[in-house]
């Protein structure tokens, strides 16, 4: 090697630096784009596509109808009304059957077996009255609607219709700083918020996905519909003549669901303007070709992926909740059970919020599953007010077939119309259930967003019920 | 106690107090937090930056200019200057303040942090253009040397910030900007914008409003003492010379004619087709990669298929798949309209 060719590392670095300046600041970007362009050119030359023109025309015809200005929205409303109607009416019978099987038949039988084996009362109480009861309740309320709702929803998705819904609604969501696909995770949230949070995976933009996760709780889930329907029927339906009572109570439940949708938009907008402003946002929405739904495969995957997943989580959380409810209502300290102590302690706060101690305690123990709110409230009200002859005793949840008997219990607990309205509001706007909180943590991997999603709606619930209660009482005074 | 009037007043008072304390940016708490950050270090570093900036223009600082740049009183400015002198970051030569070697290193370090941060904000976050400079101003003082270097590594050691300013290297070298001001650029020649100002804010805002960013190809049509008229991507822009003089342009050798004439995809009517000629430099970071992933590259044929009943997005056929794009996205894509051949 000759002397001239001896180059010091510093020279190389200097040359590199020089070259770098020559190629300019956007060098990386230009390189990436050149590679992409070359790759597509090679692909275009090498790949032969079968002529798929006729297929494409059929797709366009369907698209022209489902996204048209005239038919787009009505068609969408019609389809979703059918899905909800099928879910609600279809779930009634199996729900009743499951309740009969698990609560009316299996429960007494198990009690009998335990008695025959002379097992101590507290083991029997903890296992059967507490854990078994809570789990059975969650299953019978939750399982049938999910078995119908999720497959129907997945079929629409598989057919290719749901991306068109996101396409139709995108502009509304854009104005709230969100993504059109949030309409789908919201819709899924009406079935179950945990499934709705999982469904936000279809949103690939980080900011919009977090918005969809945090606001999913404002979709009134399957576990909260029974609470809404019962309270609306018992209190709101009773305000009007019997002929229109059904209609009015149904409308009031729909009004609550619509209020939830409005909150979704308002909170999405506020989040995108404040805490989530700095998150990366990219929009993309692919409209896949239509195809005949694969019915059996869809039913299988929607049951495995969604129903079983959610159900398993709910059971895991319901078992300890049942035990907790039973223990707190049965362990006594100076003559009162722990539940009664907590209820009395919470009562002043509850009354200021237009609720009461029983409701607040019920929402604490029902964090694992919203399905057990009503049975827990009934059990605690009976426990607290000392009514005799109703229910199965301390720590045993129950529901009554007769509406007037239910109303009697509520009246004995000191409920008014305000309590009912605020309970409906609070049921819509409070922390997500523990299954959903856990799912949010799994999906975001962040404690911060999990805490925000849990406490934001809870604080909102307190503020809203508080103001409703004060204004209500003020109007009553005038 | 349960009188609704009293409770209602307490509630409203409480809400008002919470808003007063925690309202983003304007509340007491966020203000206190940003005030805490205005420490001695911030004043010192900002003063050094100011002196360094003047030095580039062969000017020297005065107590008044420091006070103006840092928005402090003249007394405070004097204290800051004397404290910098004690630390031997500046020295007086011939009655004028100069940066010492150490002072220059610190000033370039801060400048490097600032420009890297702007680049980071542009590419890895969702903050909008007008916020980059202000946020970088706040963050630049809180980074350690290691943090600055790891930031540079994550960004792939970029050479320029999003405004086209060169980023000083880690050993404190800063490249000089070439090119000339848009007002001085010859008429009817193609140039590439290499720099737009990030301050003063009034000028930066006007240029943002015209959606001009570095990397765009420009052709000056008219340059008079009252106005500068120029073409970017087929659209005509007019700016006052006082604003246009802040835009720096370099010559480009050859530019395909389509790039200058490229139209916005958003203008394509339903049923029409166009060929992509370029993707605007405004579209950056994750957004840009996303569009590239979808196959939006020079030469790709895009056809507008149908519009959402909500008004946007529009569905485009791109490489045999249907992709919906919002209007602002479609605006980034510049196309050459194709005349549809009537299929026989």
Image (spheres, coloured by chain):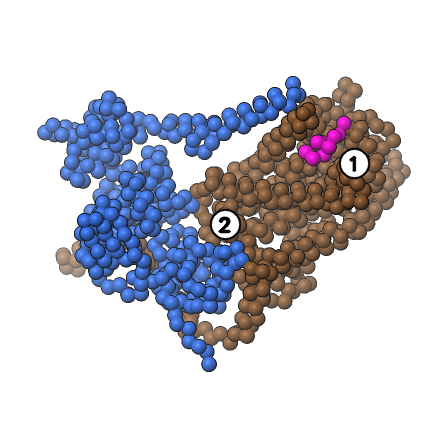
Image: magenta residue range: A414-422
Which quarter of the figure has residue A364?
top right
Q: Chain of mark 2?
A: A
To which chain does the residue with label 1 belong?
A
Report the residue marked by disc 2. Answer: A174
Label 2 neighbourhood size at 10 Å, few (<14), some (14-19), many (20+)?
Answer: some
Quarter of the image containing the N terminus of chain A? Answer: bottom left
Mark closest to the chain's N terminus, 1 or 2? 2
Relative to A298, residue A203 above or below: above
How crowded pointer 1 is (Cα within 10 Å; few <14, some 14-19, many 20+) is rated as many
Q: Say if the magenta span includes residue A417.
A: yes
Per the picture, the main secondary structure of the magenta-coloured stretch is: helix
In the rendered image of the structure, the colour used to display chain A is brown
Give the side of residue B218 with respect to residue A249, left or right.
left
Chain B, colour shown = blue
Is residue B253 inside the magenta stretch? no
Q: Nearer the viewer, residue A62 or A399?
A: A62
A313 w.r.t. A50: above or below: above
Q: Which residue is mark 1?
A: A397
């Amino acid at each position: 090697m000759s002397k001239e060719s001896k180059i010091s590392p510093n020279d190389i670095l200097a040359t590199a630096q020089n070259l770098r300046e020559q190629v300019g600041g956007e060098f990386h970007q230009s390189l990436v784009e050149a590679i992409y362009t070359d790759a597509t050119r090679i692909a275009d030359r090498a790949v032969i596509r079968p002529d798929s023109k006729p297929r494409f025309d059929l797709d366009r015809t369907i698209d022209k109808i489902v996204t048209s200005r005239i038919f787009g929205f009505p068609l969408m409303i019609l389809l979703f009304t059918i899905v909800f109607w099928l879910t609600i009416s279809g779930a009634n019978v199996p729900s009743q059957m499951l309740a009969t099987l698990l609560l009316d038949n299996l429960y007494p039988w198990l009690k009998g077996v335990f008695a025959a084996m002379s097992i101590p009362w507290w083991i029997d109480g903890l296992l059967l009255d507490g854990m078994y009861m809570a789990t059975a309740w969650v299953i019978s309320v939750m399982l049938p609607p999910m078995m119908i709702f999720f497959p129907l929803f997945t079929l629409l998705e598989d057919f290719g219709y749901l991306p068109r819904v996101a396409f139709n609604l995108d502009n509304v969501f854009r104005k709230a700083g969100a993504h059109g696909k949030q309409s789908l995770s919201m819709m899924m949230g009406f079935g179950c918020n945990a499934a709705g949070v999982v469904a936000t995976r279809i949103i690939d933009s980080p900011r919009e996905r977090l918005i969809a996760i945090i606001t999913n709780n404002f979709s009134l889930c399957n576990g909260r519909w029974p609470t809404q329907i019962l309270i609306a029927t018992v209190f709101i339906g009773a305000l009007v003549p019997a002929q229109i009572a059904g209609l009015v109570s149904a409308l009031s439940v729909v009004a609550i669901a619509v209020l939830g949708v409005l909150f979704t938009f308002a909170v999405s907008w506020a989040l995108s303007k404040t805490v989530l402003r700095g998150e990366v946002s990219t929009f993309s929405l692919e409209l896949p070709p239509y195809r005949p739904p694969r019915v059996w495969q869809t039913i299988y995957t929607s049951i495995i992926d969604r129903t079983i997943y959610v159900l398993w989580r709910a059971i895991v959380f319901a078992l300890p909740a049942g035990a907790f409810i039973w223990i707190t209502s049965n362990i006594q300290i100076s003559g009162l059970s722990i539940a009664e102590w907590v209820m009395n302690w919470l009562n002043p706060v509850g009354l200021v919020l237009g609720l009461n101690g029983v409701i607040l305690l019920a929402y604490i123990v029902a964090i694992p599953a919203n399905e057990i709110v009503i049975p827990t409230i009934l059990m605690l009200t009976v426990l607290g007010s000392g009514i005799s002859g109703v229910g199965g005793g301390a720590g045993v949840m129950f529901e009554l077939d007769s509406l007037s008997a239910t109303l009697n219990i509520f009246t004995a607990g000191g409920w008014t119309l305000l309590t009912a309205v605020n309970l409906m509001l609070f049921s819509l706007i409070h922390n997500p259930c523990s299954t959903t909180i856990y799912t949010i943590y799994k999906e975001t991997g962040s404690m911060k967003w999990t805490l925000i999603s849990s406490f934001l709606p809870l604080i909102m619930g307190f503020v809203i019920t508080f103001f409703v209660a004060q204004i209500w009482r003020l109007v009553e005074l005038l | 106690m349960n009188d609704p009037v009293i409770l209602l007043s307490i509630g409203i008072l409480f809400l008002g107090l919470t808003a007063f304390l925690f309202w983003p940016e304007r509340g007491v708490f966020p203000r206190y937090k940003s005030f805490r950050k205005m420490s001695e270090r911030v004043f010192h570093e900002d003063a050094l930056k100011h002196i360094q900036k003047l030095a580039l223009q062969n000017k020297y600082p005065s107590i008044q200019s420091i006070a103006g740049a840092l928005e402090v009183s003249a007394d405070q400015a004097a204290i800051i200057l004397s404290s910098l002198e004690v630390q031997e970051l500046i020295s007086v030569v011939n009655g004028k303040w100069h940066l010492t070697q150490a002072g220059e290193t610190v000033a370039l370090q801060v400048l490097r942090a600032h420009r890297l941060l702007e680049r980071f904000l542009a590419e890895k976050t969702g903050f909008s253009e007008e916020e980059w400079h202000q946020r970088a101003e706040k963050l630049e003082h809180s980074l350690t040397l290691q943090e600055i270097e790891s930031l540079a590594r994550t960004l792939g050691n970029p050479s320029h910030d999003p405004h086209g300013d060169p980023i000083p290297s880690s050993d404190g070298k800063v490249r000089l900007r070439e090119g000339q001001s848009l007002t001085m650029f010859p008429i009817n020649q193609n140039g590439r914008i290499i720099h737009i100002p990030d301050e003063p804010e009034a000028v930066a805002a006007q240029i943002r409003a015209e959606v001009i960013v570095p990397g765009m190809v420009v052709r000056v049509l008219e340059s008079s003492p009252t106005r500068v008229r120029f073409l970017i991507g087929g659209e005509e822009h007019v700016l006052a010379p006082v604003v246009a003089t802040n835009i720096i342009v370099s010559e480009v050798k050859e530019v395909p004619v389509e790039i200058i004439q490229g139209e916005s995809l958003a203008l394509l009517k339903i049923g029409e087709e166009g060929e992509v000629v370029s993707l605007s430099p405004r579209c950056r970071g994750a957004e840009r990669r996303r569009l590239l992933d979808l196959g939006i590259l020079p030469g790709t044929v895009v056809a507008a298929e149908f519009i959402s009943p909500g008004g946007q997005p529009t569905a485009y056929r791109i490489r045999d798949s249907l992709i919906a794009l919002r209007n602002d996205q479609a605006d980034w894509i510049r196309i050459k309209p194709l005349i549809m051949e009537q299929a026989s």
